Structures are given as C-alpha cells and as structure tokens.
Amino acid sequence: MGLKREFIKGTFWTTFSQVSVQIISIGVTIVLARLLQPEDFGIVALSGVFVGFVGLFGGLGMGSAIIQRQNINDDYLSTSFGVSIFTGIGIAFVLTIISPFAAKFYDKDIVKYIIMVSSIGFLLGPFTSIHTTILTKRLEFNKLAFIAITTQIIAGITSISVALMGFGVWSLVLGGLVAQALIIPIIWHIVKWRPRLIFIKQCFKDLFGFSSNLLASNLFSYFARNFDNLIIGKILGAQALGYYSIAYNLMMKPLEHISWAVGRVLFPTFSIIQADKERVRLAYLKIIRSISLITFPMMMGLMMVSKEFVLIFYGAKWEPVIIPLQLLCLVGALHSIGTTVGTIFNSQGRADLQLKIGLFNSTIYVIAFLVGIKWGLLGLIIGYISATIPLLFSTQYFANRLISLKMRTFLKALLPATICTLLMVTVVSMFSYLNGLVLHLTMIITLITSIALGIASYTVFGLTVFKIPEVEDVKIFVKQKFAYHITLC
C-alpha cells in the first residue's frame, strides 16, 4: 500500500476518532454542567495546572523520538518503557509532595487531594504510552481510533455515574482514571509487543538527544498556555476559572483535535519523507487548506450562535461564558492552523529551533496575561488575542522556511476558506438582524435556523463560487461511491 493511501487512510481514521471523541466529550460535559457548579470545573482546572506541568516529564518525550527516528528496534522500545515507568513513579511522588503547597497557593484544601489522586494516572500511563507509539509509527490509526473512542466512552459513563451519586467535583477526576486503568488490558491485547526489563544507555542517549529539546519546548509552551488558568484562579477565583475553562475548551478542544488528528498522521508520514522538501511542502499546503475549510466556518459559526448554544445546552447559570467564548472564537481558527507547525519542526529534526521560538512565545504570553488580568477576565482574553495573532504568524514563518514554503503561498492556501466563511457570516448576520427586527423566533428555532443557513450558504459558496480542489475531490469521491452502489444494485 503506497504512502499516500496510508496517509489518507490514517487521516480518515484519526479524524473519525477525534470527531467521535469530541461528540462524546461535549455531550458528557453538557450533562456534567447541568449536574455540577462552575466552581467545580474551576477547582479541577486549578489542579490541572500543576498536574499537567509536572506530567509533561512523563516518558521524557521519547515517544516522539521513536516516531521520528528511522531505525528503531526492541532495545529502543524496552528502554523507553523502562524510562516511562521510572519517570511515572517520580512524577507521582513529586505531585504528592507539592500538592499541599498548591492547595495553600489557591487557599483551597481540596486541590491537594485532587492532585494526589490525579497522580495515579502517571503510574498507569507508561503501560499504554509505548504501545500507542508503536501503533502510530506503524500508521495503524484504525486501532488507535478504537482505543480513543473506547477510552472516552468509559470515562464519560464513569464521570456521569459519579456525578449522579452526588460526589460533585470528583466526577471530573475519577472518570479519566478509571478509563486509563480499564484500557490497559485492551491495548496489550491489540499490541502484541511485550517489554523487556532492560536499559540500554546508547538507546537512551540517542532518543533523549532529540526528545530533550522537544520536552523543553513543550514545558515552555505549557507554562505559557496555562499561565492564564494560574492567575485567573489565584486572582479572580475558581468560579471565574470555571467559566473560562468551559469557554476555552468549547472553542479550542475541537479545533486542537481536528488539527491534532491530522498532525498525528502528518508527523510519522513527514518523518518518512523528511528529505524530500517539495513533497512535504505540497502535502502540507493541501493539509492546511483542508483544515481551514473545516475550522474557519466552525469557529465563526460558533461565535454567531454562542448565546443560543450556551443557554440551551448549558443553562442560564453559564451565561457568563458567552462573551469569553465569542472573543476566543476570533483566534480559534488561526490556532487550528498554528498547531500544525510542530509536525514541521519535529519531522525535520529541528526541535531545537522549536525550543527557541517556544521560549520567546512563552515570555510574550506571560506578559500579555499579566497586563490583561488588570481588567478582569475579558481583559486577559483580549491580551491573549493580542499576543496570539502576531506570534502564530511569526512561528509559521520559521516553520515554512524549513520546507521552503513562501508566506504568500501559505496565505493563498487559506484564502478560499476565509472568503467563503466571511460570506457565510454575512448571511447568518442578516438572518440574525431580521430575526431581532421582525421574526422574533424562539431560541431553539433561531439556533437551528442559523446553523442550517450557515451550512447551506458555506456549501453553496464552496461548490459554486470557488472551485476548491478538496471540495471537488469529495464530490468526485461521492459520485464514484454512488455509481458503484448503483451498479451493484
């Protein structure tokens, strides 16, 4: 099977997986939002800042090194497994030690216990991380899709069950842990590889030589991306952080997972063809054009219907989420493209350059958050937007240079989705104005009509006004499949 066909197959399964996971995740979050209070989500977000930061050291980033390296044998895999076990124990220990200080920092004693319980996940993680890395390197994304969806279902059922039993905030913690434990035997059944208890120093040095730069870059990036949670929780409180975390996750997680779904396939694929710059460049342009066709209208559409969406599905107590969500949607589309640059840096073996850029970006984000928080939650978000736009473009510039991609060519690839999205926004805005002036439809009818008009107008513009290659490819594919089934009949 050719690499192109493997890529298409991998992209399909990963996208299917992430869409399924997001549908389940959003559904579970809506149910939990009805059962829990905003402060519960804020408390978990407070704990998550510390858990996530320390957790970045898990496996020392060797999974990416295994994927990037061309020749990997069992010595490398077993060494990585041993390192993952060791670091997992170390992380659990560190989190237990720092948990009282985190609770004191926020003046919330429950944070200590949430961090301690969450640390169990780092004892379980090593038993699946190398196995899923093996599947990624083999491009077996159908199996990864099954694992991801199964894990999300188990986590969702557990979280809702715990919430219904009245355990409140713990429903947001225990769901993931239970799923993490129950998925281990399933993954070991799927992946027949079994680790040996060995440690090969040369294997470790080879892998860590690549992953150390990536690990440092991830640390700076994580600190910058979560510093907002840290200061919101400290200065504005858990309730404000609860509103912010819902708005941020509602906007960012679907986008990140769409880009991540493609990026997860891109990284091993680009690693295989890393020396062929032209091939990488053409494939990358096609990918970002495809991503923009999905995420640009998704973000602008969410911004247009955010009020109706939040009030209908989350309830009136979540009304403060609306304006933050609308503001975050403005940069959400750009983030969906920006998250793909890591595949360029890593596949080209330039994690060192990514580290330098990440350090600079992190500094700017921290400054923006510190300045913005003086004007409350909305001030912080505006500061975040102000920093995000120039930083995304500057990072993209350096990534493009690695594959000899001109910025003009890059922007041209995004033009069709941008214009079609603006036309879609115009149509939905006209309906909104007419509805407020004359129609006065109910909230649910307004939401349904706005979504339908948005999809219909975007599709019409994409099919008729612009001859977008990816849209034409889908049309041809559908026609071929339809003709095939007609022939069988």
Image: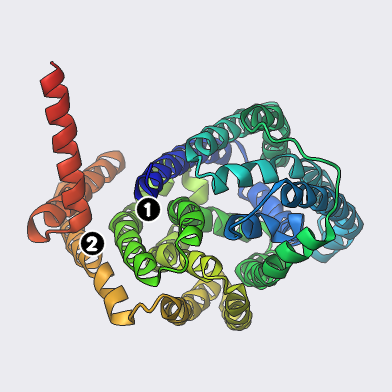
**Which comes before the other along the chain, label 1 or label 2?**
1
Circle 1: is it few (<14), some (14-19), or many (20+) Cα within 10 Å? some
The extreme left residue here reads 464
Is residue 205 rendered to the left or right of residue 283? right
* CA–CA distance in space, label 1 to label 2: 20 Å
Q: Amino acid at mark 1?
A: Lys
Residue drawn at (69%, 49%) of the image: 73
Residue drawn at (55%, 37%) of the image: 148
Is residue 63 rendered to the left or right of residue 368? right
Q: Amino acid at mark 2?
A: Thr
On residue 307, which mark appears?
1
> Which quadrant would residue 69 be assigned to in this image?
bottom right
Residue drawn at (52%, 47%) of the image: 317
Dot 1 and dot 2 residues touching (CB under 8 Å): no
Task: Name the image colouring.
Answer: rainbow
Tell me where residue 418 appears, x and y as whole percent: 25, 67
Tell me where residue 257 appears, x and y as whole percent: 48, 51
The extreme top residue here reads 489
Is residue 279 rendered to the left or right of residue 449? right
Task: Locate the C terminus and report the quarter of the image it occupies.
Answer: top left
- Does 183 appear above or below 300? above
Tell me where residue 27 appears, x and y as whole percent: 48, 36
Any part of residue 288 in sight: yes
Q: Which residue is mark 2?
A: 421
Helix, strand or loop at label 1? It is helix
Nearer to us of marks 1 and 2 is: 2
